[in-house]
Image: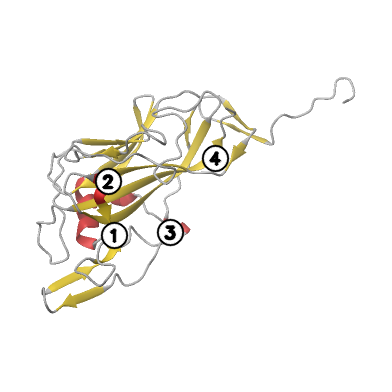
Amino acid sequence: MPAPGLMIPDSIAQWRMPDGSVIRLEDWVDKPVWSCADLESGFNDRTITLFTYTVGEEVASTANITTRRTSTERDTNVQVGGSNASTEEILVFAIRTEIYWYELTTIHDATTARVAGAAGGADTGMPIPLMPNLSLFNQGLTLRLMVSQKAYAEEGFGYFNTGFGPYGFGVISADLELGSIRTYGNAGLPSDEAVRYYRMPHHIGGTEKYRVELKNYQGDTFTAVNDVGTNNALNTLHRVFVHLEGARKRPTA
C-alpha cells in the first residue's frame, strides 16, 4: 500500500490542448485506424464515406457497385462505425492513403475483383495502380476528416502520401500485340519523411462522431484508363485505404 498522501500517477504523460482540455496517456498505443472503399470505374459520386462500417458489414463503395463486399479485418479495424467507442480516443498526427487496382470479372460486382494477368495476360502488373488513374484521383478528389460535423483536415487526394509500399521507376512496358504502354505508380515516395505530419494533432474523443470523406466537388465521372491507354476500362476497380495514424487509446470492451 502506498504511504498516506502519496499520489500514484495513473498516466505516463499528458497533453494540454489549445482549448485547455488535458489528454492523459493511459492505455495508449501507436496503432493506426484504417478503413477502405471500393471505387468502380465510371463513378460520379459526390461523396464516398469511410470509417462508417465494422468487420462483417458492407464495405463502403461507389453507387455504381450493385453487389458489395462483406468487410474483413483487412478492410477495417474500426470498433464502432462512424464513432469511437466510449472508452476510445484517437490523436491523428497523419493521414495516409493506400491504393490497389483490380479487374472485375463481373462489372458492378465488387466480390469478383481479382488480380488479373497472373499468367502473363494483358493486365499484368496488378494490383499496382496505373499512374494516369492515380493522377485522376489526385486531380478530382478531395479528402477530408470530419469530426463532430466539422472538417478538421481537408486537402486534395494527392496531398496524402502513402509513405510505404513497393517502389521503382513505375514499370513501363510495351505490348507488341496490343500496342499498349503501362506506367505503374505509387502514391508518393515510400518513406516516412514524405508523409505530412500535423503540427497539432486532431483529437477524436470517446463516442465522438467522425468519418473520412472522398469529395467529388465537381461531380466528375471517373473513368479509368486501361492498360492500352484508352478510357474504356469499365471493369476496373480501385480499392482505396485511408489510415489515421497517431496515438490511440484502446477501447476496454
Q: Name the residue under label 2.
A: 111
N-term mark: 1 or 4: 1
Q: Position of residue 97 (x, y in %)?
A: 36, 49
Query: Which amino acid, mark 4?
Result: Ala
User: Is disc 2 surrounded by few (<14), some (14 to 19) or many (20+) residues within 10 Å?
Assistant: some
Label 3 SS? loop
Disc 2 is placed on an element classified as helix
128 relative to 231 in the view: left or right:
right
Say which residue label 4 marks. Answer: 247
| Amino acid type at mark 1 | Val
Mark 2–mark 4 distance (CA, rounded to whole Å) = 33 Å
| Residue type marked 2 | Thr
Judge from the rendering whether residue 51 lies leftward or rightward of residue 121; answer left or right: right
Crowding at dot 3, Cα within 10 Å, few <14 / some 14-19 / many 20+, comes out as some
Place of residue 96 in the rendered image (x, y in percent of width and height, measured from the top left): 40, 49
Q: Residue 242 carries which label?
A: none
Q: Is residue 184 visible?
A: no
CA gap between label 1 and label 4 equals 34 Å
Query: Are circles 2 and 4 on residues that touch, CB within 8 Å?
Result: no
Dot 3 amino acid type: Phe
Residue 125 picture quarter: bottom left
Is the C terminus in the top left, top right, bottom left or bottom right quadrant? top right
CB atoms at circles 2 and 3 under 8 Å apart? Answer: no
Q: Distance between the residues labelled 2 and 1?
A: 12 Å
Where residue 221 sits: x, y (%)?
12, 45
Residue labelled with disc 3 = 164
Q: Could you tell me which residue is drawn at 26 percent across and 52 percent down?
A: 113
